[in-house]
């Protein structure tokens, strides 16, 4: 896993966390800082230049997730200047012992989880690079001082992000 991806995801997580909880999904393009400063020289001095291959996250303000984030991501294609992408989103989940009680209908299941006393709220920040590197970070609302992380923290979401780097004719 690329250290530069993890460093960038930690920056994204800090940025998103500073706005508190109950936020919509937020999408970020990850670009090499040197490339960003070539294209946008007026940002010099405002964007930290730590190393030549460091990544800078650029929030995609026009991104609005639907109920099916994976489907929404399937319509995104990045230009060659984008080295990677990341998404920050919040979800509620239940401990495994309650999964058998979930209704089959996705809408009813979401309502069931939202009202369940054993639910936990989590914010994940998942990012990928064109070369296939991926990583995820997670913070629980109930334990905000701990930041969890792992390469396969949210594998389906990482795969959906990697798919945004396919060519448009695939």
Image (cartoon, grey):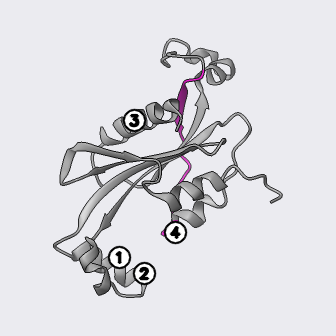
Residue beneath disc 1: 110
Instruction: Name the element at disc 4.
Output: loop
Compare marks 3 and 2 and give the one earlier in the sequence.
3
- Magenta residues? 53-68
The x and y percentages for residue 78 are 69, 45
Q: Quadrant of residue 93?
A: bottom left
Residues under numbered marks 2 and 4 in contact, where contact means CB atoms less than 8 Å apart: no
Residue beneath disc 2: 106
| Label 3 Cα neighbours within 10 Å, binned few <14 / some 14-19 / many ≥20 | some
C-alpha gap between disc 3 and disc 1: 28 Å
The x and y percentages for residue 31 are 61, 32
C-alpha gap between disc 1 and disc 2: 6 Å
Q: In the figure, 100 relative to 161: above or below?
A: below
Q: Residue at left 59%, top 17%?
A: 52
Residue beneath disc 4: 68
- In this rendering, position of residue 168 left or right of residue 103: right
Q: Residue at left 30%, top 38%?
A: 18
Compare marks 2 and 4 and give the one earlier in the sequence.
4
Compare marks 3 and 1 and give the one earlier in the sequence.
3
Instruction: Name the element at disc 1.
Output: helix
The x and y percentages for residue 105 are 42, 86
C-alpha gap between disc 4 and disc 3: 25 Å
Closer-to-camera residue (160/23): 160
Residues under numbered marks 1 and 2 in contact, where contact means CB atoms less than 8 Å apart: yes
C-alpha gap between disc 3 and disc 2: 31 Å
Q: Main secondary structure of the magenta part?
A: loop
């Amino acid at each position: 896993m690329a250290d530069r991806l993890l460093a960038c995801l930690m920056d994204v997580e800090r940025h998103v966390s500073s706005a508190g909880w109950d936020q919509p999904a937020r999408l970020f393009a990850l670009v090499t800082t040197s490339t960003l400063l070539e294209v946008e020289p007026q940002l010099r001095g405002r964007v930290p230049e730590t190393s030549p291959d460091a990544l800078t996250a650029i929030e995609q303000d026009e991104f609005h997730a639907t109920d099916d984030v994976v489907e929404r991501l399937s319509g995104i294609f990045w230009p060659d200047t984008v080295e990677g992408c990341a998404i920050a989103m919040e979800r509620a989940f239940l401990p495994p012992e309650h999964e058998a009680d979930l209704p089959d209908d996705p809408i009813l299941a979401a309502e069931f989880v939202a009202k369940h006393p054993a639910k936990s709220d989590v914010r994940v920040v998942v990012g990928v690079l064109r070369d296939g590197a991926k990583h995820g970070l997670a913070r629980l609302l109930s334990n905000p001082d701990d930041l969890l992380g792992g390469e396969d923290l949210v594998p389906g979401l990482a795969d959906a992000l990697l798919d945004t780097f396919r060519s448009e004719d695939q």
